[in-house]
Amino acid sequence: MVPTSIPEKIRHCNDHLVRAAACQHHIPGVTTDAVNPVPPGPLFLNFLSASNFWNRGCWPGNIAKVVNRGMEEWICAGHGLEDAPATTEHPDHVEGGNERGVRKKKGGDGSTGIVVMDNVGENGDWDLVKLIVGMNVGVLMKMKDQI
């Protein structure tokens, strides 16, 4: 409803990306067989868009500028990693220490699921789309390695 709620929107979107990354996606015929069929799994659907028609500061384009950038920062800084930063402002900062060292991949595929967003590709900027597709390609790469 108001621009000051946008950081909360980003946190909710980040949390949903974390849940999607932690999921292990089974691949029919590769990680399953006739005895162990593909178990039903969740469909991760994340909406980055938001709007408030009555508040120009909350029109979809204005929200997308902030939320899309927040998603890009999150995916680059810690998506699918253990001990990922709670904020993207200082990705290597840890309380009580100066660096995280090498962060390890969490369990799961690290995918993002389906992410619905506004104003992608504006002025030729397709970075967020490329990041999301790249994260989801991990499941396909796993399938290639198994075949």
Image (cartoon, rainbow, N blue to C red):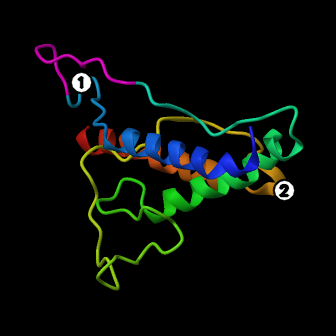
**Magenta stretch contains residue 36:** yes
Q: Give the crowd class for mark 1: few <14, some 14-19, many >=20 residues within 10 Å.
A: some
| Residue 134 in the figure: left or right of residue 22 | right
Query: Residue 122, percent across and down?
Result: 81, 51
Q: Is mark 1 on a helix, strand or loop?
A: loop
Q: Which of 95 and 69 is in front in this view?
A: 95
The residue pinned by badge 2 equals: 123
Q: Which of 54 and 92 is in front in this view?
A: 54
Q: Give the range drawn in magenta.
A: 32-42
Determine the image quadrant of residue 44. top left
Q: Disc 1 residue type?
A: Gly
Query: Residue 30, percent across and down?
Result: 23, 30
Q: In which quarter of the image is the C terminus?
A: top left
Name the residue: 41% across, 65% down: 85
Decide: is 32 above or below 86: above
Residue 140 visible? no
Q: Nearer the viewer, residue 140 or 65?
A: 65
In this view, the mark in front (2 or 1): 2
Query: Residue 102, percent across and down?
Result: 29, 74
Name the chief secondary structure element in magenta.
loop
**Magenta stretch contains residue 65:** no
Q: Disc 2 residue type?
A: Asn
Name the residue: 66% across, 57% down: 69
Name the residue: 27% across, 36% down: 24
